[in-house]
C-alpha cells in the first residue's frame, strides 16, 4: 500500500506568503489580496441568498404554502433578491476576478488607485452589515425593486436599513468602476493597444462605464425613498401627492443597465474560455469587443420595457419595444462568434470549458425568451408571472453564475498556485447545468399558464410543475456546494500549478502561479494580438 504524499509547499515569494497576519490583509493595497477579501465576502452573501431561495422553493412544494406564512414569504423573496442582485451578482466577477486579473492581463503592477480599491471593499462590508442587521432584526417585505407604496407607506418592516445598505454598497461599485477605467486607460503594458486588449478587459471596461453612469441615479432614488419615509415629503407615494411611475422610471433606468453589469463580465469570461479551450483565435475579435460597448450604450435606452403595463403611451411602448430588440443584436453577435470559434477547433472539455458551454446555452435561451417580453402583446400576458422569473434566472443565474464558476476554476491555479481535482470539477459543472434546467424550465410553463410570482400559495393544478422545480433546486444546491468541498482542500492538497497550466496566451499566464507581490519581475511588452493560437494550426 503506497503512502499518501502531500504536495510540496509553495516556497517562491508570492502575494500569499508575504506577511501572513490578519492586519496585513485588512490594510493591504495589493489588488490580488483585495480580490480574495471580496471572494470570501461575496461567497458568504451567496450562501445567505441561496438559503432564502431554498426556503422559497420548499414552501412552494404544496399549493397551500405550509412552511411559512405570507409575511415571512414576502421577506424571504425580498432578502433573496436584494442579496443576490446587489451583493452577489453585480459585484461578483468585477470585484473578484476583475480586481485580481485586470492588472495581470494588461501587464500592470496594480490598479491605478490601490487605496481606493481597499476602500471599495470596506464600503461593501459596511453595506453588507446593514443588510445583515436587517435580516437579524426581522427582515423587509418590499421586494428587491422597492416599489411604492411598499417602500414608502405600506410596509412597517426595516425598509430604511435595507435601502441604506444598498445605497452604501452602490458606492463600492462606483469606486471599483472608476478604478478599472483609469487603470485600463493609463497602465497598459507597452504594445498593448486597444486592438490587442483581451475581451475580458473590454467587458470590464464596458461594465465600468455602466457602473459610473447608472449607479448614482439609483443611489439618489433610494435617498428619495428614505426621505419620503422619514420626512413625509410627497415624491413617489400617491397618498402624499407623489408619482409612483416616477419611481419606476428612475429605478429601471438603473436596473436594466444593471442587468448588463451582471452579464457583460460573464461574456468576457466566456470569450477567454472559448478561445483557450478550443485553441483558436476568437472569430471576429473586433465585433465581439465593440458589441460590449454597444450593449453598454443601448442598455440605457430600454428601461421602459419593464413598464408596458404601467400606463405607458402606445407610441412610447412601441419605441421601447424596438430598442429592446436592438439590444439583442450585439448579444447575438457574441453568441454567433463564440460558436464560430468552436467550429473546427481543438476543443478540450475541461471544467472551465463546461461552464463556458453552459453559459452559452443558458444565456441564449434566456435571451430568446427576453424577446418575448419585448413584444407588447406577449408581455401583457406573462408580465409578473413565473415566465419573467425563469427568463431572469436563465440569464443571471444560469448565465452569469456559470461564467463566475468558469472564471473561478480557470483562474484558480493562478490565484492560489494549486490545481483542483478535475473529475470533481466536471461533476459539479454537469450537476449545476442539470439542476438549473430542472429548476427553472418548468417555470416558463407555469408563467405561460398564468401563475403569478411572489405568491406563497397557488392553485393545485400548478403543483406538479412546482414539485419538479423544487426537485431541481435540491440538485442545484448540491452542485453549488460541491466546489466548496474540493476547492478549499485544494489549497493544501492540490498539485502545485504551473505558470500556464492551460496553455493560454494572455499576459496573466506569463508570470508565476501565484503571482509575486508586484505581478511581474519586469514590465512585459506586447507584440501580437490578444489570442494568437496560429502557431498551433497546422
Image (cartoon, helix red, strand yellow):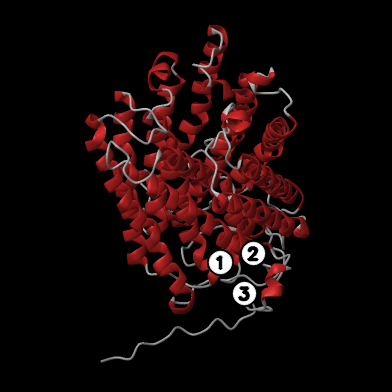
Q: Are marks 3 and 2 in contact (CB under 8 Å)?
A: no
Q: Please state which of residues 171 and 278 is positioned toward the viewer in this rendering.
A: 171
The tag earlier along the polypeptide, 1 or 3, is 3
- Where is residue 251? Give x, y as percent: 62, 29
Residue at (40, 51) in percent of width and height:
355
Image quarter of residue 277? bottom left
Marks 1,3: beta carbons within 8 A: no
Residue 338: which quarter of the image? Answer: top left
Q: Residue at x 55, y 20 (%)?
A: 323
Q: Earlier in the sequence, mark 3 or mark 2?
A: 3
- Sequence-earlier tag: 2 or 1: 2
Q: Residues within 10 Å of mark 3 (few under 14, many from 20)?
A: some
- Position in image of residue 279 (x %, y %): 43, 54
Left or right of 125 in this view: 339 = left
User: In this image, 115 relative to 348: left or right?
Assistant: right
**Residue bearing mark 2:** 32
Q: Nearer the viewer, residue 122 or 456?
A: 456
Q: Residue under label 3, please give it.
A: 16
Answer yes or no: is residue 297 visible: no
Task: Give the alpha-carbon distance from disc 1 to disc 3, as whole Å.
Answer: 9 Å
Classify mark 3: helix, strand or loop. loop
The reply to whether callout 2 and callout 1 are in contact (CB within 8 Å) is: yes
What whole-number distance in Å separates the C-alpha atoms at marks 2 and 1? 8 Å
Element on which disc 1 rests: helix
> Circle 1 sits on which residue?
415
- Residue count near mark 1 (Cα–Cα under 10 Å), binned few <14, some 14–19, many ≥20: many
User: Measured along the vertical axis of the image, is residue 425 above or below residue 83?
Assistant: below
Residue drawn at point x = 44 percent, y = 68 percent: 487
Q: Position of residue 117 (x, y in %)?
A: 72, 56
**Rendered position, 500 above or below 131:** below
Amino acid at each position: 500500500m503506497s503512502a499518501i504524499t502531500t504536495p510540496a509547499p509553495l516556497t517562491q515569494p508570492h502575494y500569499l506568503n508575504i506577511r501572513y497576519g490578519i492586519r496585513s490583509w485588512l490594510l493591504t493595497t495589493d489588488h490580488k489580496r483585495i480580490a480574495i477579501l471580496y471572494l470570501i465576502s461575496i461567497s458568504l452573501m451567496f450562501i445567505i441568498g441561496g438559503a432564502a431561495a431554498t426556503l422559497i422553493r420548499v414552501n412552494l412544494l404544496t399549493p397551500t404554502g405550509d412552511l411559512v406564512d405570507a409575511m415571512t414569504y414576502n421577506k424571504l423573496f425580498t432578502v433573496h433578491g436584494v442579496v443576490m442582485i446587489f451583493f452577489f451578482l453585480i459585484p461578483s466577477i468585477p470585484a473578484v476576478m476583475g480586481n485580481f486579473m485586470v492588472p495581470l492581463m494588461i501587464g500592470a503592477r496594480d490598479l491605478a488607485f490601490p487605496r481606493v480599491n481597499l476602500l471599495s471593499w470596506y464600503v461593501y462590508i459596511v453595506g453588507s452589515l446593514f443588510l445583515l442587521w436587517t435580516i437579524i432584526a426581522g427582515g423587509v417585505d418590499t421586494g428587491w425593486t422597492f416599489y411604492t407604496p411598499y417602500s414608502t407607506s405600506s410596509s412597517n418592516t426595516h425598509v430604511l436599513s435595507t435601502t441604506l445598505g444598498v445605497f452604501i454598497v452602490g458606492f463600492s461599485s462606483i469606486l471599483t468602476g472608476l478604478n478599472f477605467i483609469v487603470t485600463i486607460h493609463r497602465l497598459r503594458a507597452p504594445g498593448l493597444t486597444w486592438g490587442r486588449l483581451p475581451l475580458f478587459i473590454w467587458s470590464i471596461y464596458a461594465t465600468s462605464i455602466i457602473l459610473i453612469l447608472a449607479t448614482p441615479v439609483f443611489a439618489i432614488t433610494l435617498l428619495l425613498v428614505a426621505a419620503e419615509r422619514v420626512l413625509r415629503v410627497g415624491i413617489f407615494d400617491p397618498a402624499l401627492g407623489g408619482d409612483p411611475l416616477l419611481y419606476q422610471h428612475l429605478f429601471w433606468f438603473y436596473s436594466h443597465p444593471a442587468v448588463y453589469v451582471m452579464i457583460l463580465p460573464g461574456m468576457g469570461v466566456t470569450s477567454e474560455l472559448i478561445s483557450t479551450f478550443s485553441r483558436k483565435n476568437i472569430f471576429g475579435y473586433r465585433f465581439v469587443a465593440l458589441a460590449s460597448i454597444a450593449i453598454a450604450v443601448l442598455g440605457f435606452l430600454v428601461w421602459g420595457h419593464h413598464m408596458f403595463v404601467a400606463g405607458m403611451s402606445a407610441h412610447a411602448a412601441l419605441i421601447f419595444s424596438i430598442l429592446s430588440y436592438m439590444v439583442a443584436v450585439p448579444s447575438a453577435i457574441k453568441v454567433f462568434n463564440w460558436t464560430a470559434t468552436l467550429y473546427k477547433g481543438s476543443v478540450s472539455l475541461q471544467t472551465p470549458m463546461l461552464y463556458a458551454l453552459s453559459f452559452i446555452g443558458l444565456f441564449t435561451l434566456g435571451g430568446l425568451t427576453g424577446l418575448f417580453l419585448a413584444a407588447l402583446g406577449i408581455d401583457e400576458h406573462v408580465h409578473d408571472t413565473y415566465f419573467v422569473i425563469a427568463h431572469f434566472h436563465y440569464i443571471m443565474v444560469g448565465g452569469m453564475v456559470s461564467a463566475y464558476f468558469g472564471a473561478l476554476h480557470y483562474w484558480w491555479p493562478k490565484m492560489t498556485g494549486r490545481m483542483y481535482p478535475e473529475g470533481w470539477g466536471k461533476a459539479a459543472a454537469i450537476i449545476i447545468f442539470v439542476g438549473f434546467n430542472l429548476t427553472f424550465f418548468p417555470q416558463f410553463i407555469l408563467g405561460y399558464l398564468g401563475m403569478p410570482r411572489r405568491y406563497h400559495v397557488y392553485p393545485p393544478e400548478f403543483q406538479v410543475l412546482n414539485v419538479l422545480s423544487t426537485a431541481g433546486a435540491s440538485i442545484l444546491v448540491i452542485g453549488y456546494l460541491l466546489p466548496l468541498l474540493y476547492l478549499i482542500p485544494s489549497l493544501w492538497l492540490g498539485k502545485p500549478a504551473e505558470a500556464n497550466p492551460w496553455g493560454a496566451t494572455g499576459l496573466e499566464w506569463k508570470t508565476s502561479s501565484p503571482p509575486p507581490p508586484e505581478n511581474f519581475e519586469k514590465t512585459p511588452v506586447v507584440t501580437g494580438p490578444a489570442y494568437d493560437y496560429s502557431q498551433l494550426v497546422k
